[in-house]
Image: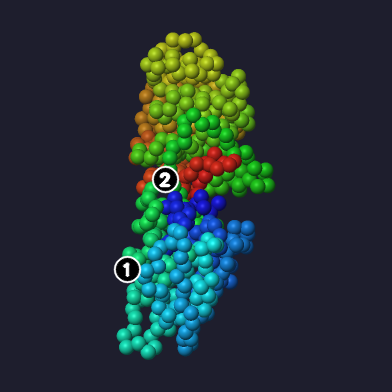
Amino acid sequence: MFLEHLPLELREFLSMPSTRTLLVHGGPGSGRTSLGLALAVASPGRKVFFSGRNPAQEVRRQFGWLAGPAGRDVEFLDESEALLSRPQHLRLGPTLPRPAGPGRRPSTPPPLPTKVQEALPQGLRELLLRTNEATPTIVVLDSLEALLEHVQRGLSRGLSRPLGREDIAAMLLQGLSRTPAHFVLLSESTAPDQTDYLVDGLVTLDERSVEGLPLRLLTVQKMRGAQRSHFRYPFTLDGGMFRTLSPWAPPPLSRVVLPEPEPASAASPANSDGLWPGCRGYADFFGTLAPGRLTIIDQESTCPAEAGETMIYPMVAHVLGQGGQALFIPPPVTSPTEVWEMLQSTVPRERLVEQLKIVVGKLEPALLDDHLSALTPLAAGPSGLGAGEESEGVLVGGRTRSPSTLRRFLGSMAERPSTSLVVAELAGIESLLSSLEGTPLSSGDLPVVLRRVLLRRGMHAVILGDGNDSRFRALRPIAHRELSVRLHEGQVYVYGVRPRTLLLGLSHGTGISPYELIRMA
């Protein structure tokens, strides 16, 4: 679980046979400790968490999941009291050994100076002496500053010129690099310094914003021995667990959409008086699809079209699977054939033509013939249909002709509005309503006709469009809910504009969910 939620570069870091040192920069609350614990849990072999600032008991309390199976193997080395107290007179002991063996670095540099070693907290000193190549080990040091301050105080007596932080850090890292273990150094500093050049890997944790909403980012600055696939990863600390999101990639169009089953009434969201949206994540953050209401989804033009479709296909699939009816107007780039491929396993083919109508814009006759032949028997109409004509399963919209089949279908939907859903692309719904009215509609006319034709008859409508479009702006006053879909540095994010929500990362589903909405908190 934890391994797959880490960036690829850090996973490669953990799998390297020789010692690696990783420095993590991040200010207070940036997620340093969460990342350090995730790296420890995901690593094979022995896992040690050196607690120098906060007592181990406090860390365990803050991260309750450590009591579960994932965190039981983490050993805590609590040196918080030792690091916060004044060190006693140093008693010299054995120096750190120079381990040898295949895959190890040459041990030509001098060993860790005896006084530096003796200035280390006793528990850490003994841990380093006992570490061997036979047992893979990762040591997370939290924090580097606390450890260096302790060592600096211990070395200050008897020296004509006190050693500086960077000098001590250089000596410490030199010794750690010859110890057979991986070391993750959690740094409270956010400013670059000499230490950055001495470690094998360097990442920084900081916070940016998307549309004014906070977003946490992990930046891979350096990773010796591992190729950087991506420079920056968004991450979340929701639930006290560190989790990164890989750049969003559209799902294959040929995939079949299976909605997440609606939970039992006792486990349903508070807003359970409407259609189930086909995904628990959507229901948790935005509720269900209430009858006679409008949901608008503002998807900026730079965002992949598949992002919005990822959320709407499970809605349609659930309605069809429950015996309801759906009117679907896909974007111009999506053909009826692709819609059929998405929904083909939802209900038997003979029922699909009765429950679903796909409305497409004007098409050239040859292109329409291709679609109809591919959809047979879904589109059970005559071949050779021209633009503006209709079949049983596919309706070709036009502004000059009112399709009788569509009117009959809308009448049937109005008889059972609680199980009826209209999903449409903005230009498509405008064209459809114009066709039904027999005249082109202006932006100001669109909300009036939409309410009369669909909403007042009890159907829920979901409309996707560009928020800068005048038609979309005209729909805002009558919308019950508005969502925004945005693309930022390769990742797709969703958030509620009305009502307002936090930023959510859109990710492909795993297991039972068709997709995931991950709170970027």
| Label 1: which secondary element | loop
Q: 398 or 218, which is in the foreground?
A: 218
Q: Which residue is mark 1?
A: 193
Count the marks. 2
Q: Quadrant of residue 143?
A: bottom left
Taking 96 as reference, is 290 left or right?
right
Q: Earlier in the sequence, mark 2 or mark 1?
A: 1
Q: Mark 1: which amino acid?
A: Asp
Q: Residues within 10 Å of mark 1 (few under 14, many from 20)?
A: few
Taking depth in this image into account, of 83 and 113 the one nearest to the observer is: 113
Compared to 283, does 398 lie above or below? above
Q: Could you tell me residue 517's position as x and y percent? A: 50, 46
For disc 2, the marked residue is 247
| Residue 3 as seen in the image, left or right of residue 397 | right
Relative depth, front residue between 103 and 503 = 103
Q: For mark 2, does the 10 Å Cα neighbourhood hold few (<14), some (14 to 19), or many (20 or more) residues?
A: some
Tell me if residue 217 comes above or below residue 152 in the rendering.
above
Residue plotted at (55% across, 62% down):
135
Q: How far apart are labels 2 and 1 at the CA level? A: 30 Å
Give x and y (percent) for residue 134: 54, 62
Q: Residue at x 37, y 33 (%)?
A: 443
The secondary element bearing badge 2 is classed as loop
Q: Position of residue 407 (x, y in %)?
A: 51, 20
Q: Please state which amino acid type lies under the numbered disc 2.
A: Pro
Residue 138 visible here: yes
Q: Is residue 491 above or below residue 395?
A: below
Residue at position x 42%, y 52% from top? 9
Residue 433 figure quarter: top left
